[in-house]
Image: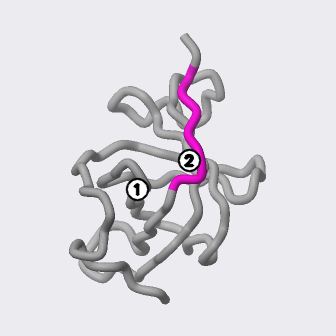
Amino acid sequence: MKLSKNAEQRKTDRVPHEASVRYSVGGQDEYHPARMFNYSSTGMYLELQFPPPKLGANLLIEVMDGDGEEPWFDRNAPKTCYYAKVIWKKNLTDNQAHYGVGLRYLSMNTPEG
């Protein structure tokens, strides 16, 4: 697996922030839960329980508004959506999640309200 770049190679600083997210690969209707741990103006870092999508895969990321996990299956739940590409991934050993994934944004859509 490709490992992440170190902080000195990043163009933008990461903001520590934890949130529940769900993602789908390539516009499919199947969603998988994940946890976001930080983000920047160019991308975000997720941790997954499931095997990660392949490098270069395009994902639709839905960051669930609120702090609970109840809205997972509610398509009308408030969320912020991002389109991103998998740019690196790694196996995690000392963590509840099994995989870490680095994403670069392709675009962003916020909910209308």
Label 1 sits on what residue type?
Met
Label 2 vs 1, first from the N-terminus: 1
The percent position of residue 91, horizontal first and vertical second, equals 40, 82
Side of 86 where 44 appears, left or right? left
The percent position of residue 27, horizontal first and vertical second, equals 76, 51
Q: Which residue lies furthest to the front in this view?
A: 11
The percent position of residue 11, horizontal first and vertical second, equals 32, 64
Residue drawn at (66%, 68%) of the image: 57
* Secondary structure found at label 2: strand
The answer to which of 17 and 15 lies nearer the viewer is 15
The answer to which of 75 and 62 lies nearer the viewer is 62
Establish if 13 lies above or below 72: below
Label 2, residues with CA under 10 Å away: few <14, some 14-19, many ≥20: many
Q: Name the residue under label 2.
A: 61
* Secondary structure found at label 1: strand
What label sits on residue 82 in the rendered view?
A: none
What label sits on residue 44 in the rendered view?
A: 1
Residue drawn at (29%, 75%) of the image: 9
Q: Which residue lies furthest to the bottom in this view?
A: 1
The percent position of residue 31, horizontal first and vertical second, equals 64, 50
Screen quadrant of the C terminus: top right
Asked whether residue 109 is drawn in magenta, I would say: yes
Callout 2 touching callout 1 (CB < 8 Å):
yes
Label 1, residues with CA under 10 Å away: few <14, some 14-19, many ≥20: many
User: Which span of residues is magenta-colored?
Assistant: 105-111
Asked whether residue 27 is drawn in magenta, I would say: no
Establish if 113 lies above or below 22: above
Side of 112 where 16 appears, left or right? left
Q: Main secondary structure of the magenta part?
A: strand
